Image (cartoon, helix red, strand yellow):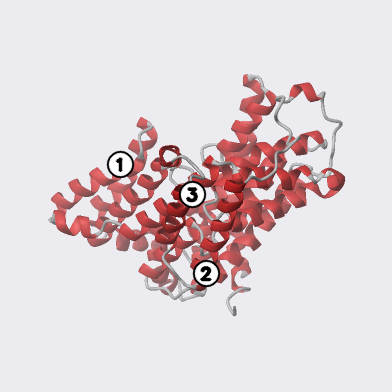
Amino acid sequence: MEAISLLSLIFVIALGVYTKKNIGIIALAMAIVLGMIGGISSNEIVTGFPTSLFLNLFGMFFFFAIAQNNGSLELLSKKLFASFGRFATFYPLMVFVVSALITVVDPGGLTGYVVLPAITMSVGYQMGYNPILIGVLTIFGANATLMTPVGVFGNTANLIIDSAGFPSYTAQILLNGVILFSIAGIISYFGLRGWKRNQPAAAASLEADAGPVDLPVINGKQKLTLLMLVLMIMAIMFLKTHAGLTALFFSIILLLAKTADEKNAFLGVPWETIFLCIGIGNLLSVIDTLGGLTLLASVLSSVSTEWTVAPLLGITSSVMSFFALAIAGPIPTLIPTIESLNTLNGNPFIDIELISTVINGGFTASISPLSLGGAMVLAAYGTLFKPTVEERTRVFNMLFLVAIVISIIAGILANTGIYRITAGI
């Protein structure tokens, strides 16, 4: 039954990719079927439903849907990048840093992934930079701080780590993300020859409104949204309140203040992402009950040694993330296997090293055009430059290659002790 339960996860992901249907919904259905086969009651399956995860995801995404709806974060981002013209030489570095900082301010990660690429790529192109490089640095900058403990993904990962029996590593996970994706940014800069600046083509090649010019003043509704954002982050950080419920509390204040339309806010929530996470989470709960995750640990240990266990975990996490959201697929699947894998190989690593290996490995694939980050870079390129089919294919292949190379490098780096640096914090 252990093998059947584990194979069901592979089947669900493959079926979702092949049919282009939401993997989370398929996973919920599979949890019921698997439970019936394995003798697990419906009540037990419902008990395994990740309620806290659902509240975290919905609350945070709902708040940022409001912020997106009234344009507060987008306008703030544009104002920041509009002032960068006189610092053109340092623009790639500023893109990475500002994207990272905005992701701390916007713990939902939506601004860094969805809003920023079109803005940064447009400004970078006008400065003569390769827009693909700028897009890559934007996503890697967002990834560097995506695991902030007050954010959707960081908070969710910490819940998974806590459920697996590990102590809190919130600060270490965040800092290790900064370390890994700073290295990824540097590699991308040199690999895509970021020092070369070309004379940009005529401005007409861009959309008329592509450049952040003649920006309006931040209005009262947007100021209130940004204030609520700051208060929300402070409450989660210092009062240790539940992230999702806190976000819903401040969302209600914004809706009562009529800063956004409630219907549009609900429409702006990425329901597909939410159901992907909770569906996979529910299925993994059933698989764990049936012994599937224990079997996975056994299989991985049979092909790993003290020299290969970390790269194997990192690269496996990356490969899984090409087909499933990191926080929904590889992170909850692989984190529970870490302790047994480490023990079977003589405990060559401390826990935080392998935890960071899995988490960072999962997000290196985000620049793939099959993932959200790469898809938004590709979409921004298409909107700004109207490429031919051949040019679009070239960009697609370039992003895919970057994802593969960085994923392999990240896996190898896990063996160097790079994640041990933060252990004493």
Crowding around mark 2 (Cα neighbors within 10 Å: few <14, some 14 to 19, many 20+) is some
Q: Which residue is mark 1?
A: 25
Using the image as rendered, state which of residue 408 and residue 123 is in the foreground. 123
Image quadrant where residue 281 sits: bottom left
- Dot 1: element: helix
User: With 332 as the anchor, is 348 left or right in this view?
Assistant: right
Mark found first going from the N terminus, 2 or 3: 2
Residue 161: give x, y in percent of width and height: 42, 67
Marks 2,3: beta carbons within 8 A: no
Residue ID for mark 2: 237
The reply to whether the C-beta atoms of the residues labelled 1 and 3 are less than 8 Å apart is no
Crowd around label 1: few <14 · some 14–19 · many ≥20 (10 Å): some
* Among the two numbered marks 1 and 3 on one chain, the one whose residue lies closer to the N terminus: 1
Q: Is residue 256 above or below residue 389?
A: below
Q: Please name the residue that numbered disc 3 is placed on.
A: 257
| Amino acid on which disc 1 is placed | Ile
Residue 215 spot, x, y in % from top left = 72, 38
How far is mark 2 from mark 3, CA to CA?
Answer: 25 Å
Q: Nearer the viewer, residue 408 or 151?
A: 151
Identity of the residue drawn at 42% across and 44% down: 273
Residue 233 is left or right of residue 381, and the answer is left
At 56% from the left and 41% from the top, the residue drawn is 368
Q: Give the quadrant of residue 402.
A: top right
